[in-house]
Protein backbone atom coordinates (compact mmCIF):
# COMPACT_ATOMS: atom_id res chain seq x y z
CA UNK A 1 0.00 0.00 0.00
CA UNK A 2 2.86 2.35 0.85
CA UNK A 3 4.45 1.89 -2.59
CA UNK A 4 1.15 2.52 -4.33
CA UNK A 5 0.88 5.88 -2.57
CA UNK A 6 4.50 6.71 -3.44
CA UNK A 7 3.86 5.84 -7.10
CA UNK A 8 0.70 7.97 -7.23
CA UNK A 9 2.56 10.88 -5.65
CA UNK A 10 5.39 10.53 -8.20
CA UNK A 11 2.91 10.51 -11.10
CA UNK A 12 1.24 13.63 -9.68
CA UNK A 13 4.60 15.42 -9.37
CA UNK A 14 5.62 14.46 -12.89
CA UNK A 15 2.32 15.67 -14.34
CA UNK A 16 2.45 18.87 -12.28
CA UNK A 17 6.03 19.90 -13.06
CA UNK A 18 6.51 18.58 -16.59
CA UNK A 19 4.44 21.34 -18.17
CA UNK A 20 1.49 18.99 -18.70
CA UNK A 21 -1.75 20.40 -17.33
CA UNK A 22 -3.50 17.59 -15.43
CA UNK A 23 -6.77 19.52 -15.77
CA UNK A 24 -7.11 20.53 -19.44
CA UNK A 25 -9.48 23.43 -19.99
CA UNK A 26 -8.83 24.87 -16.54
CA UNK A 27 -7.73 28.49 -16.50
CA UNK A 28 -4.95 28.24 -13.90
CA UNK A 29 -3.62 31.78 -14.26
CA UNK A 30 -6.76 33.53 -13.01
CA UNK A 31 -7.74 35.09 -9.73
CA UNK A 32 -10.63 37.18 -8.52
CA UNK A 33 -11.76 39.23 -5.59
CA UNK A 34 -15.25 40.10 -4.44
CA UNK A 35 -15.77 43.04 -2.11
CA UNK A 36 -19.56 42.92 -1.95
CA UNK A 37 -20.04 45.90 -4.23
CA UNK A 38 -17.52 45.06 -6.93
CA UNK A 39 -15.71 42.20 -8.60
CA UNK A 40 -12.17 42.12 -9.99
CA UNK A 41 -10.85 39.40 -12.34
CA UNK A 42 -7.06 39.27 -12.91
CA UNK A 43 -5.12 37.66 -15.76
CA UNK A 44 -1.87 36.49 -14.16
CA UNK A 45 -0.80 34.58 -17.27
CA UNK A 46 1.58 35.39 -20.11
CA UNK A 47 -1.08 35.42 -22.85
CA UNK A 48 -4.03 37.76 -23.34
CA UNK A 49 -7.53 36.45 -22.80
CA UNK A 50 -9.72 37.09 -25.82
CA UNK A 51 -13.53 36.75 -26.01
CA UNK A 52 -14.04 36.59 -22.24
CA UNK A 53 -17.37 35.96 -20.55
CA UNK A 54 -17.63 36.66 -16.82
CA UNK A 55 -20.53 35.06 -14.94
CA UNK A 56 -22.14 35.59 -11.54
CA UNK A 57 -24.36 32.90 -10.01
CA UNK A 58 -27.10 32.56 -8.94
CA UNK A 59 -29.16 34.45 -11.46
CA UNK A 60 -27.13 33.92 -14.64
CA UNK A 61 -25.64 37.43 -14.75
CA UNK A 62 -22.98 37.74 -17.46
CA UNK A 63 -20.60 40.33 -18.82
CA UNK A 64 -18.68 40.08 -22.09
CA UNK A 65 -15.17 41.50 -22.26
CA UNK A 66 -13.30 41.61 -25.56
CA UNK A 67 -9.81 41.31 -24.08
CA UNK A 68 -7.97 41.13 -20.74
CA UNK A 69 -4.24 41.58 -21.23
CA UNK A 70 -1.56 39.73 -19.22
CA UNK A 71 -1.00 41.36 -15.86
CA UNK A 72 -4.20 43.39 -16.10
CA UNK A 73 -7.73 43.00 -14.80
CA UNK A 74 -11.42 43.71 -15.32
CA UNK A 75 -13.18 45.50 -12.50
CA UNK A 76 -16.83 46.41 -12.07
CA UNK A 77 -20.42 45.28 -11.87
CA UNK A 78 -22.17 47.82 -14.09
CA UNK A 79 -22.29 45.63 -17.21
CA UNK A 80 -23.45 42.36 -15.62
CA UNK A 81 -27.00 41.49 -16.75
CA UNK A 82 -29.11 38.32 -16.97
CA UNK A 83 -31.16 37.00 -19.91
CA UNK A 84 -33.99 39.42 -19.04
CA UNK A 85 -31.48 42.32 -19.29
CA UNK A 86 -31.82 42.97 -15.57
CA UNK A 87 -28.63 44.44 -14.16
CA UNK A 88 -26.91 42.85 -11.19
CA UNK A 89 -27.61 44.81 -8.00
CA UNK A 90 -25.08 44.03 -5.24
CA UNK A 91 -27.44 45.41 -2.59
CA UNK A 92 -30.33 43.04 -3.38
CA UNK A 93 -28.45 40.16 -5.05
CA UNK A 94 -25.81 37.83 -3.67
CA UNK A 95 -22.88 36.27 -5.50
CA UNK A 96 -22.08 32.67 -4.52
CA UNK A 97 -20.07 31.66 -7.60
CA UNK A 98 -17.99 33.63 -10.08
CA UNK A 99 -16.82 32.10 -13.38
CA UNK A 100 -14.33 33.30 -15.99
CA UNK A 101 -14.72 31.72 -19.44
CA UNK A 102 -12.27 32.34 -22.29
CA UNK A 103 -13.34 31.25 -25.79
CA UNK A 104 -11.40 30.80 -29.03
CA UNK A 105 -14.24 32.28 -31.10
CA UNK A 106 -15.90 35.71 -30.73
CA UNK A 107 -19.49 36.51 -29.85
CA UNK A 108 -22.18 35.46 -30.33
CA UNK A 109 -20.93 31.95 -31.17
CA UNK A 110 -18.47 31.52 -28.29
CA UNK A 111 -17.67 27.93 -29.07
CA UNK A 112 -14.51 25.89 -29.03
CA UNK A 113 -11.35 26.23 -27.02
CA UNK A 114 -13.18 27.15 -23.85
CA UNK A 115 -11.08 27.62 -20.71
CA UNK A 116 -12.79 27.99 -17.34
CA UNK A 117 -11.94 29.23 -13.85
CA UNK A 118 -14.57 28.84 -11.12
CA UNK A 119 -14.53 30.62 -7.78
CA UNK A 120 -16.96 29.77 -4.99
CA UNK A 121 -17.55 32.51 -2.46
Image: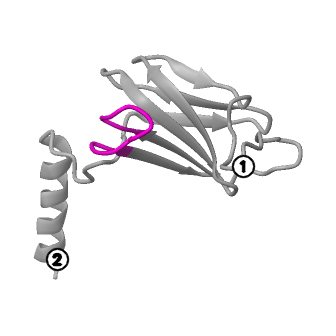
Q: Main secondary structure of the magenta part?
A: loop
Q: Residue at x 72, y 32 (%)?
A: 77
Q: Residues within 10 Å of mark 2 (few under 14, many from 20)?
A: few
Nearer to the camera, 28 or 76:
76
Check the image and report above or below for 42 versus 70: below
Q: Residue at x 32, y 34 (%)?
A: 105
The mark nearer the N terminus, 1 or 2, is: 2
Query: Magenta region: which residues?
Result: 102-115
Say which quarter of the image contains residue 79.
top right
Nearer to the camera, 13 or 49:
49
Q: Residue at x 40, y 46 (%)?
A: 116
Looking at the image, residue 1 sits to the left or right of residue 80; the answer is left
x, y percentage for residue 76?
Answer: 69, 26
x, y percentage for residue 38?
Answer: 73, 32
x, y percentage for residue 13?
Answer: 18, 51
Looking at the image, residue 87 sits to the left or right of residue 120; the answer is right
Label drawn at residue 59: none
Residue at disc 1, secondary structure: loop
**Which residue in the structure is indicated by mark 1?**
84
Label drawn at residue 2: 2
Spatial CA span between label 1 and label 2 = 56 Å
Amino acid sequence: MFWVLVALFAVFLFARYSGHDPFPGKLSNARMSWLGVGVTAWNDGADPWMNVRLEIQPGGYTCQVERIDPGSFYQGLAWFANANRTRFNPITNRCSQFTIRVFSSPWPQQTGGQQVANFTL
